[in-house]
Image (tube, coloured by chain):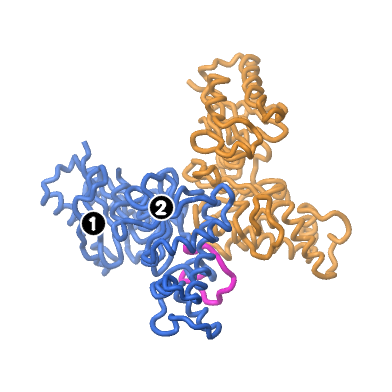
Chain colours: A orange, B blue
Amino acid sequence: MKKYCFGIDIGGTTVKCGLFDVKGELLEKWEIPTRTENNGSAILPDVADTIGDKIRERSLDRDEIAGIGLGVPGPVNEDGEIPGAVNLHWGYVHLVDQMERLTGLEVKAGNDANVAALGEMWKGGGAGCHNVVMVTLGTGVGGGIINNGQIVTGTNGAGGEIGHIHVTDSLTTPCNCGNTGCLEQVASATGITFLANRRLAADDKPSVLRSGEVSAKTVFDAVKAGDELAIEVAEEFGKYLGAALANVAGVVDPEVFVIGGGVSKAGEILLDFIKKNYRKYAFMACKDTAFALAELGNDAGIYGAAKLVL
Amino acid sequence: MKKYCFGIDIGGTTVKCGLFDVKGELLEKWEIPTRTENNGSAILPDVADTIGDKIRERSLDRDEIAGIGLGVPGPVNEDGEIPGAVNLHWGYVHLVDQMERLTGLEVKAGNDANVAALGEMWKGGGAGCHNVVMVTLGTGVGGGIINNGQIVTGTNGAGGEIGHIHVTDSLTTPCNCGNTGCLEQVASATGITFLANRRLAADDKPSVLRSGEVSAKTVFDAVKAGDELAIEVAEEFGKYLGAALANVAGVVDPEVFVIGGGVSKAGEILLDFIKKNYRKYAFMACKDTAFALAELGNDAGIYGAAKLVL
């Protein structure tokens, strides 16, 4: 009988590791550095080693281990391959095969944003739901779509890449992806800062944002303090994100949108600005879709990775 | 061993019926009228009767029948229930249960647009693919999403309702759905007519469209004849639809978009206007997604309904 599994979240600087029981209890978590040199050739062997060490340290029976789930920062197709390995600056292509050979355990892999969405569905803000859209508002805007409990990977591993939905023709500078007018440019932490600076430059309206640092955090702190200009910025952010999520609902019609990432630390007030605009644009059948804050923080990746093999 | 199945497409005026073998060969198709009076209380019994008649006429062994698939013009949830029965003006709620009771056969049901998408994936423009987005450009704009071979039904049965994606703030009249600026308002047959009339009214530029009827068909006929104003209209249509489908790709990342409905009779030239704009807005990993014309026409529904039970 299977009792345990490992959830591994491979990031650019650290690999987060979790040992779970099959009910989803996190028994232990730890980190190792991500050694990216030499096209990351040490990454998978390092992960295999730390898992081997943990098995020995805890005297786990290998037959009781359901497997290893891997979340990686790039597209992974349904065969566990990385079609655009260049995005990771790693040499790996057959991620699952190689990891299975290194460990002798069953391995499943997914894109980190998708895997985090699975984690939030399992034990976080989307618990109890089977159709979840997770939106991560950090430096960029990440997304993960769970339909009927399964990750929507997409043909090119680009399922859930909602940060690159086109939302406006009003921008002139391109997004990191090469297109112009992406959601990420106006709804990420960087995007909110951009919107705030653009609004500040438009006229002389007083605002606490005129003295001190302008960031997603200071904007939402100012919103909470009743700063009118900051509220205008939050409204604009909410319009772009709310309209984009309304369009996402017209495609996959989720039960809940889970909002995570650094920007989500602003709390419920952030959801208010998104929800109001979402309801304006959403198709009638989807106007009451729930919104929730993510609950697992940086652990969403290891939870979701573990769920991949259960 | 199962040898046969029925695919039934319930429309507003007729019920299309198909008898298939389990490999997907259409053995026979026929129609019966849809009796919508008395909240459509006769519809399911009529369907059960015509299936019973066919079984007797062909002396089919009931044990060899895999089941009955039903496509219906409204949202159907994953339990085979119609959450918003009012949309159909029918009294049915537990569609699958009632049909199983009437026939003693296994029944599956789905929304007609989703079921048509499944049909095109199985035997039409998306044959060989498992991730398909079907777009039906008719009086309205319908959509159906197939991910990993399964219909994306959505929590409220609104999966694939891409006709109501918000695409423009420039409209003042509301869509049938109550929102304003929906894709359907600018990319359906009616929408193309609207764009053409708006363009014609803007100035005095000569066009063959100034004499005679303005419709989606006459617009694309004029495009083929090199009419500059008609080409502008087609460009505008292509921009709205191409950008919307680019956003759909950022959510589910299909292998192919299958374009059907009356407007698609314009042929490959229609795809050219959509593809060019799609590529402009699509996320890099999805820029080369294929586009195909639907192939099954009005039979897509019976094919897809049959596939539901196989």
* Label whose residue precedes the other's in the sequence (2 or 1): 1
Q: Looking at the picture, how far across and down is residue B121, in whole percent?
A: 37, 49
Q: Looking at the picture, how far across and down is residue A64, in whole percent?
A: 52, 19
In the rendered image, which residue does mark 1 sit on? B17
The chain that hosts pointer 2 is B
In the rendered image, which residue does mark 2 sit on? B77
Our reading of the magenta stretch's main secondary structure is loop
Residue span colored magenta: B163-179
At mark 1, the secondary structure is strand
Name the amino acid, label 1.
Answer: Cys
Res B160 quadrant in image: bottom left
In the rendered structure, the answer to whether residue A227 lies left or right of residue B101 reads: right
Q: Looking at the picture, how far across and down is residue B209, in whole percent?
A: 44, 80
Residue at the (50%, 44%) spot, across then down: A154
Judging depth in this view, the residue of B284 and A147 nearest the camera is B284
Name the amino acid, label 2.
Answer: Asn
- Looking at the image, do the residues carrying marks 2 and 1 touch, with CB atoms under 8 Å apart? no
- Does residue A130 show up? no
Residue B131 located within the stretch drawn in magenta? no
